[in-house]
Image (cartoon, rainbow, N blue to C red):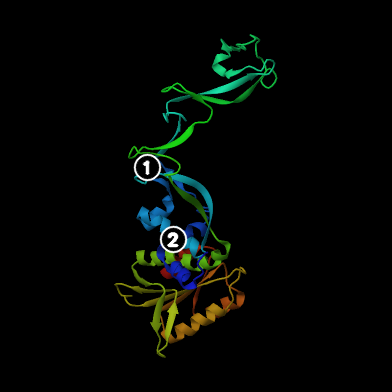
Amino acid sequence: MLKTDKTERLELYKNRDTQIFLSKFLSGELTELEPVYDPKIGYRYPPVEAIVGDVSNVEEFLNRLYETGILERRLYDKVVHCSTCGSANISIRYCCSFCKSFDIKRSALIEHVKCGYMDIEENFAKGNKLVCPKCHEELRKLDMDYRKAGMWCTCKDCGKSFDIPVTAHFCRNCHANFTFEDAVIKDVYAYKLKKEAKEVSVGWIVIAPIRDFLVENGFEVESPAFIKGKSGANHTFDIVAYRKKGENAQKTTVIDLATSSENTVSEQPVIALFAKTYDVLPESAYLIAIPKMSENGKKMAELYNIKLIEAKNQKEAIKALATLMKK
């Protein structure tokens, strides 16, 4: 059963690694995360490894996003791992059903339709022709003169013949031999962002690159941030940025983000941000509306001296923010 704990899901949305990862779906860089096979360690997810750093943390990271309902997954493959050392660098061996040697020869069985004689294909071959060893008639047309009747195996070690070989596994890493009964079989998944999580993700995902942009440009950033106003009340902002040094040091910039699935953000976030800034008195206040703000909201933002940014994604938001902050 999937976890539905909203608190855990919210904590994941706040996590920087989660925000960077989900931004790849929202930007179109990823539509589905598919694993890449590495012969030494099995399947890997390079885009996730680049974010979380330690390869051993990748599976737990993706599982948490799946279990909290942010990602959906589909079975991509099943991988055999060595029961001794855990390696995925495994070869499959088809072995003799009598002596278990894997040095076997596989041949096609042929049946001459007319006389009913059946033998391996090599015994019918005469130069470039197929000739029945029993009646000596040439076999010209498949499924008319002759038919394929399956496979036949011969063991080069014990010399015995059989139709179905025994399957075994060989670990190329530690050289262990093991059977199906002892094999460790792991499910491997491909992942997608769930539709219902997409809208919620937009808000959190835009925050991560904006926060990084501000840090790179000399700001000290808190996100989310809490500031006590002159009334004594604490107010929450999606991002609060301070200059670390220079003549603008300690001047406060507050940023809130508003999204809408209806394509137009209402004026309510403008009103809410104005109420907070009136009590906190920051140097500047920005509201990022994704994808765009209503006409009433635009008018109110101008009236309340709130710098409004309309953007379809985080790249547009950062570009617009950079332009406004230079003024």
Q: Which residue is mark 1?
A: 40
Q: Specify the amino acid type for callout 2.
A: Ile
Residue that extends furthest to the left in the rendered view of this protein: 245
**What residue lies at 40% left-to-right and 90% top-to-bottom?**
232
When asked about the image quadrant of residue 296, the answer is bottom right
Residue that extends furthest to the bottom in the rendered view of this protein: 231
Residue 286 placement (x, y as % from top left): 47, 74
Whether residue 201 can be seen here: yes
Of badges 1 and 2, nearer the viewer stands: 1
Q: Is residue 183 above or below residue 210?
A: above
Q: Secondary structure at mark 2?
A: helix
Residue 188 placement (x, y as % from top left): 48, 50
Residue 32 placement (x, y as % from top left): 52, 53
Q: Nearer the viewer, residue 103 or 163?
A: 163
Q: Is residue 174 above or below residue 15?
A: above
C-alpha span from label 1 to label 2: 28 Å
Q: Which residue is mark 2?
A: 20
Q: Is residue 161 above or below residue 140?
A: below
Q: Specify the amino acid type for callout 1.
A: Lys
Whether residue 315 can be seen here: no
Would you call the spot at circle 1 few (<14 residues within 10 Å), some (14-19), or many (20 or more)?
few
Left or right of 220? Residue 258 is right
